[in-house]
Image: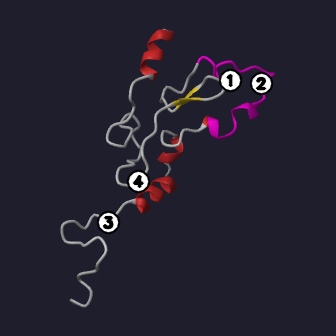
Amino acid sequence: MKEANHKKSSEKVTIDETMPHQINAPSFEGTGIKMQEPFKNKYGVTIGDSLYASENSPLENWSKDTDPAIMSGDEWVHPTNDIGWNTSENKELLENKRKPQGFPFMHPTKDVGHGAD
Protein backbone atom coordinates (compact mmCIF):
# COMPACT_ATOMS: atom_id res chain seq x y z
CA MET A 1 0.00 0.00 0.00
CA LYS A 2 2.80 2.42 0.87
CA GLU A 3 4.42 1.79 -2.52
CA ALA A 4 1.20 2.67 -4.37
CA ASN A 5 0.89 5.96 -2.48
CA HIS A 6 4.52 6.78 -3.19
CA LYS A 7 3.98 6.30 -6.93
CA LYS A 8 0.93 8.55 -6.88
CA SER A 9 2.78 11.36 -5.10
CA SER A 10 5.40 11.54 -7.86
CA GLU A 11 2.79 12.02 -10.59
CA LYS A 12 2.13 15.48 -11.95
CA VAL A 13 -1.09 16.87 -10.42
CA THR A 14 -1.53 19.90 -12.70
CA ILE A 15 -2.71 20.47 -16.26
CA ASP A 16 -2.51 23.87 -17.99
CA GLU A 17 -1.84 25.79 -14.75
CA THR A 18 -4.81 24.29 -12.89
CA MET A 19 -5.61 21.26 -10.72
CA PRO A 20 -8.46 19.42 -12.46
CA HIS A 21 -8.83 16.91 -9.62
CA GLN A 22 -10.11 19.73 -7.36
CA ILE A 23 -13.57 20.72 -8.56
CA ASN A 24 -13.36 24.37 -7.41
CA ALA A 25 -9.65 24.93 -7.96
CA PRO A 26 -8.83 28.14 -9.81
CA SER A 27 -6.69 28.38 -12.92
CA PHE A 28 -3.36 30.18 -12.58
CA GLU A 29 -3.13 30.57 -16.37
CA GLY A 30 -2.48 34.16 -17.41
CA THR A 31 -1.74 35.34 -13.86
CA GLY A 32 2.06 35.20 -13.98
CA ILE A 33 1.99 32.66 -11.14
CA LYS A 34 3.52 29.34 -12.16
CA MET A 35 2.35 26.07 -10.62
CA GLN A 36 4.99 24.63 -8.32
CA GLU A 37 5.93 21.02 -7.69
CA PRO A 38 5.23 19.30 -4.35
CA PHE A 39 8.04 19.55 -1.78
CA LYS A 40 9.10 17.74 1.38
CA ASN A 41 9.32 19.79 4.55
CA LYS A 42 11.85 19.25 7.35
CA TYR A 43 9.61 16.55 8.87
CA GLY A 44 9.71 14.49 5.66
CA VAL A 45 6.07 15.29 4.87
CA THR A 46 5.24 15.87 1.20
CA ILE A 47 3.31 19.13 0.79
CA GLY A 48 1.28 19.81 -2.36
CA ASP A 49 0.83 16.28 -3.71
CA SER A 50 -2.95 16.32 -3.10
CA LEU A 51 -2.82 13.04 -1.16
CA TYR A 52 -3.16 14.81 2.22
CA ALA A 53 -1.69 11.90 4.14
CA SER A 54 1.94 11.16 4.76
CA GLU A 55 3.50 8.47 6.92
CA ASN A 56 5.64 11.09 8.71
CA SER A 57 2.85 13.61 9.27
CA PRO A 58 1.99 14.57 12.85
CA LEU A 59 -1.65 14.13 11.82
CA GLU A 60 -0.99 10.47 11.08
CA ASN A 61 0.93 10.05 14.35
CA TRP A 62 -1.15 12.23 16.68
CA SER A 63 -1.14 11.60 20.42
CA LYS A 64 -2.00 13.54 23.56
CA ASP A 65 1.66 14.59 23.68
CA THR A 66 1.68 16.15 20.19
CA ASP A 67 1.99 19.93 20.23
CA PRO A 68 -0.34 21.34 17.52
CA ALA A 69 2.16 24.17 16.91
CA ILE A 70 4.38 21.62 15.16
CA MET A 71 2.12 22.02 12.10
CA SER A 72 2.26 25.81 11.87
CA GLY A 73 4.30 27.85 9.44
CA ASP A 74 4.99 28.15 5.73
CA GLU A 75 6.58 24.70 5.50
CA TRP A 76 3.07 23.22 5.79
CA VAL A 77 1.54 25.33 3.01
CA HIS A 78 2.11 24.78 -0.70
CA PRO A 79 2.28 28.05 -2.68
CA THR A 80 -0.04 26.89 -5.50
CA ASN A 81 -1.65 23.61 -4.40
CA ASP A 82 -3.37 24.75 -1.24
CA ILE A 83 -7.07 24.57 -0.41
CA GLY A 84 -6.97 28.30 0.37
CA TRP A 85 -6.83 29.08 -3.36
CA ASN A 86 -10.37 27.70 -3.66
CA THR A 87 -11.87 30.57 -1.64
CA SER A 88 -13.70 33.36 -3.46
CA GLU A 89 -11.29 35.97 -2.05
CA ASN A 90 -8.22 34.24 -3.44
CA LYS A 91 -9.90 33.49 -6.77
CA GLU A 92 -10.59 37.23 -7.03
CA LEU A 93 -6.89 37.94 -6.41
CA LEU A 94 -6.04 35.69 -9.36
CA GLU A 95 -8.67 37.32 -11.59
CA ASN A 96 -7.17 40.73 -10.85
CA LYS A 97 -3.77 39.49 -12.13
CA ARG A 98 -5.16 38.45 -15.53
CA LYS A 99 -4.98 40.78 -18.52
CA PRO A 100 -8.35 41.80 -19.99
CA GLN A 101 -9.62 39.41 -22.66
CA GLY A 102 -10.74 42.07 -25.18
CA PHE A 103 -8.94 40.37 -28.05
CA PRO A 104 -9.05 41.01 -30.98
CA PHE A 105 -10.60 44.46 -30.58
CA MET A 106 -8.58 45.80 -27.67
CA HIS A 107 -5.07 47.25 -27.74
CA PRO A 108 -3.07 46.19 -24.66
CA THR A 109 -1.83 49.73 -23.83
CA LYS A 110 -3.87 52.21 -25.91
CA ASP A 111 -7.56 53.09 -25.58
CA VAL A 112 -8.34 53.23 -29.31
CA GLY A 113 -12.04 53.83 -28.58
CA HIS A 114 -11.41 57.01 -26.55
CA GLY A 115 -13.47 59.86 -27.96
CA ALA A 116 -15.09 57.68 -30.60
CA ASP A 117 -18.53 57.86 -28.95
Q: CA distance from mark 1 to mark 4?
A: 34 Å
Q: Which mark is residue 58?
A: 1
Q: Residues within 10 Å of mark 2 (few under 14, many from 20)?
A: few
Percent across and percent down for residue 67 are: 78, 29
Name the front one of labels 1 and 4: 4
Residue 20 image position (x, y, % from top left): 35, 37
Going 53% across and 43% down the picture, which residue do you hit? 79
Q: Is residue 66 magenta?
A: yes
**Marking on residue 66:** 2
Chain-order first, disc 4 or disc 3: 4
Asked if labels 2 and 1 touch by Cβ distance under 8 angstroms, the answer is yes
Residue named by callout 3: 100
Q: Amino acid at mark 2?
A: Thr
Q: Identify the residue position indicated by label 4 in the image.
A: 32
Percent coordinates x, y for residue 76 in the rendering: 62, 35
Residue that appears at 56% across and 23% down: 53
Q: Amino acid at mark 4?
A: Gly
SS of the residue under disc 1: loop
> Marks 2 and 3, Cα distance to the nearest angstrom?
49 Å
